[in-house]
Image (tube, rainbow, N blue to C red):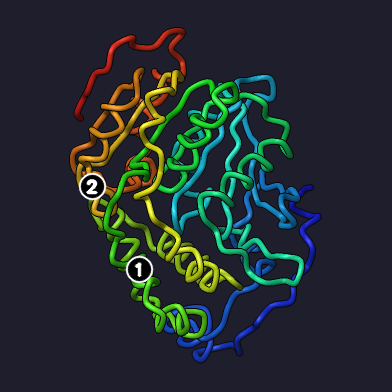
Amino acid sequence: MTRAALPREAALQAPPGAFTRWFGQGRVGFFSLSRATLARRYALPASRWVQVMGALVHYTEEGVPEGEPLVLIHGFGASLHTWEGLMPALRQRYRVLRLDIAPFGLTGPLRDARGRVVTMDIHVYRDFIDAFLAAVQVSRATLIGNSLGGLIAWDLAVRRPSLVNRLVLIDAAGFPMQLPIYIDLFRHALVRWSAPRLLPEWIIRAATRDVYGDASRVPEATFRRYVDFFYAEGSREAIGRMVPKLDFADLATDLLAGVRAPTLVLWGERDRWIPPTHADAFLARLPNATLRRYAGLGHIPMEEDPQRVAADLLPFLDAAGVPSATKELTS
């Protein structure tokens, strides 16, 4: 389904002018933005939509049609735009698919037959990613995942090893941890109740600064995109439903020892959301992994400094072979 085929949605529209700026599409967040409005702002020339579990999932497909498929999976609160800085290099050699995982980006929440927002947990994400790959006819690929997307990627490598050619984990989730304060807020019932009606923009901006190692790197357009997607119709309700289910204590990370796919682990040393020690935990369990740390970078190094990440990612993807022994590098 092409971008032009995206159906028109009913919008909760705020009045124009100063009232909108303060209470509608920014500052306070009394109003939500429709997916149609967001699509006009943030859909890309390569944007496509496909039906997955009853939802229209936004994705892009670029690069060499006959090339090796790369599937890029973003993290909590992000969108497929987080990979934009890597795309000029990746699309030259590979068939590159990016998607907005539910309930984020232009995809938004999954809904049940009665229209109620589906609570996302690891079990729903398993069904979601399996259904997406089937819908876009990918039977084997290299998976590249950041944060929550990293969890989805390594879990897929554990569950369906024949589907995964190689694995790239960028500040990936998976081990027990305390949730970042800006996510943990949604564990509180009052916040879950109020957020769909009232979520000040400064909180979203502070969270965006927090995932960068150097907050001065965040362009204003990036702030605006993160804010707009949090104000998307249904997103705040969906986030409030999923956060209490974000429990990493019971994930079977011991099964990582069975992953034979060559793996590259990339980690920002100034990650404030997932402890950098988790990079060592992945390295200790994955039998065929290389770790690269980035001094000065935060939780989303591929967005903060894509050239630095590409310098490690491309040789890994292009290599005919991979290291047979684990090694660690720092830049």
90 left or right of 272 in image = right
Foreground pick, 49 / 45: 49
- Residue 8 higher or lower than 51, as above or below: below
Place residue 39 in its image quadrant. bottom right
Q: Which residue is mark 1?
A: 205
Q: Nearer the viewer, residue 183 or 2?
A: 183
User: Horizontal placement of 25 versus 322: left or right?
Assistant: right
Could you say where residue 270 lies in the image, as x and y percent from the top left? 20, 47
Residue type at mark 1? Arg
Q: Is residue 82 left or right of residue 98?
A: left
- Front position in the image: 294 or 221: 294
Q: Quadrant of the C terminus?
A: top left
Q: Position of residue 168 (x, y in %)?
A: 42, 30
Q: Is residue 175 above or below residue 240?
A: above
Query: Looking at the image, is mark 1 or mark 2 nearer the viewer?
Result: 2
Three-letter residue code for mark 2: Pro
Q: Position of residue 100 (x, y in %)?
A: 58, 51
Q: Residue at x 51, y 72 (%)?
A: 236
Query: Residue at coordinates 41% horizontally, 30% vertically from top-left?
Result: 255
Residue drawn at (43%, 80%) of the image:
199
> In what element is the residue under mark 1?
helix
Task: Tell me, for residue 40, which label it has, or none.
Answer: none
Against 277, residue 264 (above or below) is: above
- Based on the displayed image, in which of its 4 quarters is residue 114 positioned? bottom right
How far apart marks 1 and 2 lie (CA) works out to 21 Å
Is disc 2 surrounded by few (<14), some (14 to 19) or many (20+) residues within 10 Å?
A: many
> Can you identify the residue that label 2 sits on?
275
* First in residue order: circle 1 vs circle 2: 1
Circle 2 sits in a helix, a strand or a loop, which is it? Answer: loop
The percent coordinates of residue 216 (x first, y second) are 25, 57
For label 1, count other residues whose C-alpha is less than 10 Å away and answer few (under 14), some (14-19) or many (20+).
some
